[in-house]
Image (cartoon, rainbow, N blue to C red):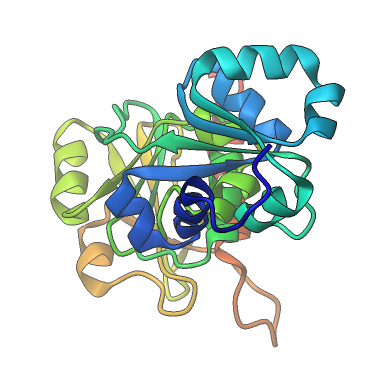
Amino acid sequence: MLTSLQNPLIKQIRKLHQAKERREQELFLLEGTHLLEAALHVERPLATLCHTITWQTKYPLLWEQAQRSAQRVELVSADVLRAIATTVEPDGVVATVERISTPAPAFTSLGLVLETVQDPGNLGTMIRTAAAAGAEGLLLNADSVDLDHPKVLRSSAGQWFQLPMAASSDLKTELSHYQAQGMQVIAALPTASLTYWQVDLRQPTLILMGNEGAGLSPELAAIANQQVTIPLSPGVESLNVAIAAALILYEAKRQRVGT
């Protein structure tokens, strides 16, 4: 059992709390039983599996499956497990997984595109919502929060491993490419004259959302086929971006029912 925080492996895993280290080590953290199950369900290999004896006793079948998938398995003390996790009360298991580069999703029907979203909780929620609404994937620009930020994974409630996702260094070019393939880009802007239910979302559609504070850049807003707004009652300044994305995604789903 590993009990020291000075163990080289433990020190290496603790560094993965930082985005810079995740990029340098080409690894990210997987915390908790639910996310571990999601990773194993899609047969994503584990680099390292760290668990407590209590967790192993509680989940013997999952432990057997996980250790077969992991390159390295370590029994650790509860104190060590808490140190390598980013949550206050981890449930007894933390794994590391290799980062892989993924191509832009093959959108043909419905997708979500994000520009400079910064809050990991928002991004994780949008991943979960996009999967629930039947979107084919999610694309965001490189200035957004890391897709493999620990809170993004937790907030996605396991859908992180189900929804095709990628980060783009040139979102404008990517959007133009999809437009050339027949997809419309619908940009959410507070100043738009049309409401989100006034546009035809039955056709192949990419829903474009911007930064939590600044919204969409003029450059991206300008290339959209349509701009839509979500009406707000007087005195309400704005909606959370994840809520706004959910409203438009589900309006697209509503319009498509029976078509």
Give x and y (percent) for residue 159. Answer: 58, 33
Q: Nearer the viewer, residue 255 or 140?
A: 140
Q: Quadrant of residue 64?
A: top right
Q: Quadrant of residue 106?
A: top left
Residue 41 placement (x, y as % from top left): 58, 16
Camera sees residue 17: yes
Quadrant of residue 82 in the image?
Answer: bottom right
Residue at 30% over, 64% down:
143
Residue 132 placement, left or right of 141: right
- Between 194 and 79, the one lying in front of the other is 79
Q: Exactly how many numbered labels are in the figure?
A: 0
Q: Is residue 54 above or below residue 43?
A: below
Q: Residue furthest bottom?
A: 235
Estimate the x, y position of residue 13 in percent, counting from the top left. 49, 50
Identify whether 39 is placed above or below 76.
above
In the image, what residue occupies the spot 21% across and 47% down?
175
Which residue is at the front of the view, 119 or 245? 119
Where does the N terminus fall, quadrant-wise?
A: top right
x, y percentage for residue 61?
75, 12
Residue for point 27% across, 58% down: 142
Q: Nearer the viewer, residue 70 or 220?
A: 70
In the image, residue 178 above or below residue 71: below
One can see residue 227 in this view: no
Q: Seen in the image, is 198 located left or right of residue 26?
A: right
